Image (spheres, rainbow, N blue to C red):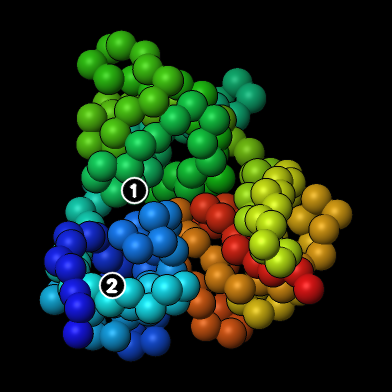
């Protein structure tokens, strides 16, 4: 078996029939890889070209970042759990926790040691200044033959999407193939669901 060795991060939920997105050295782009042997010393296979390689998967480290949520004249102190190394940008939609409550928020400003930034790795952030939002931007990449169509739409953060169901974004109807979550894992199994505020990108196909 022809294999290469790589280092990648994994989510705890990977099982025998799960997939991970990696840069394929044969295809020359990001593709889905089926996990043939479970982490930490995993064997994966590109679903596009069949290339097989060994990768060492390590559990990502998370960090809690201080956040201030602006809601009208009120400022709510909160925390946001992020993955170390994750690049956070102004305009990102995240989920904040304040006590027992959770809020959908948009990043307005990023603070690092009293300096304001437009983007910053999660572990270097001192404070995230945010605003409370009910709506989030949902992103989708939909394949139709050899074409990939990017779709974007503002939806309620509680809107739910299901793998292998029919969804409509920006007026385009398609079948949901997989859902990439903000926390890093990929939903592939039929019937798996996620809410819009949890989703980084939806992948689908049209006939």
Q: Is any part of residue 114 visible from this angle?
A: yes
Question: Residue beneath label 2, please?
Answer: 12
**For the point 35% across and 63% down, which residue is it?**
26
Q: Where does the image place residue 170, in percent across and percent down from the top left? A: 80, 50
**Circle 1 crowding by C-alpha within 10 Å: few under 14, some 14–19, many from 20:** some
SS label for mark 2 = loop
Does residue 49 appear left or right of residue 36 in this picture? right
Query: Which label number is shown at residue 81?
Result: 1
Does residue 95 appear left or right of residue 174 in this picture? left
Which sits earlier in the primary sequence, circle 2 or circle 1?
2
**For the point 28% across and 72% down, which residue is it?**
12
Label 2 to label 1, Cα distance in Å?
16 Å
Q: Is residue 74 above or below residue 10?
A: above
Q: Where does the image place residue 19, in percent across and percent down from the top left? A: 40, 75
Quadrant in which residue 159 is drawn: bottom right
**For the point 51% across and 77% down, which residue is it?**
188
- Which of 86/28 is in front? 28
Q: Where does the image place residue 203, in percent across and percent down from the top left? A: 60, 63
Q: Check the picture and name the quadrant holding the C terminus.
A: bottom right
- Which of 91/75 is in front? 91
Q: Is residue 143 above or below residue 48?
A: above
SS label for mark 1 = strand
Quadrant in which residue 25 is drawn: bottom left
Q: Where does the image place residue 67, in percent across and percent down from the top left? A: 39, 33
């Amino acid at each position: 078996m022809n294999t290469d060795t790589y280092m990648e991060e994994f989510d705890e939920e990977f099982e025998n029939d799960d997939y991970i997105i990696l840069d394929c050295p044969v295809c020359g782009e990001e593709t889905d890889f089926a996990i043939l042997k479970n982490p930490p010393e995993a064997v994966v296979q590109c679903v596009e070209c069949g290339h097989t390689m060994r990768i060492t998967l390590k559990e990502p480290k998370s960090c809690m970042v201080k956040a201030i949520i602006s809601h009208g004249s009120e400022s709510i102190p909160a925390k946001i759990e992020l993955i170390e190394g994750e690049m956070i940008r102004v305009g990102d939609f995240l989920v904040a926790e304040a006590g027992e409550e959770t809020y959908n928020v948009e990043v307005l400003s990023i603070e690092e040691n009293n300096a304001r930034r437009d983007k910053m790795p999660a572990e270097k952030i001192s404070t995230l200044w945010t605003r409370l939002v009910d709506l989030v931007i949902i992103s989708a990449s939909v394949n139709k033959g050899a074409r990939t169509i990017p779709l974007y739409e503002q939806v309620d953060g509680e809107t739910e999407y299901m793998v292998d169901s029919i969804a409509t974004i920006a007026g385009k109807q398609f079948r949901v193939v997989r859902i990439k979550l903000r926390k890093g894992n990929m939903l592939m199994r039929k019937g798996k669901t996620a809410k819009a505020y949890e989703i980084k990108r939806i992948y689908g196909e049209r006939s």
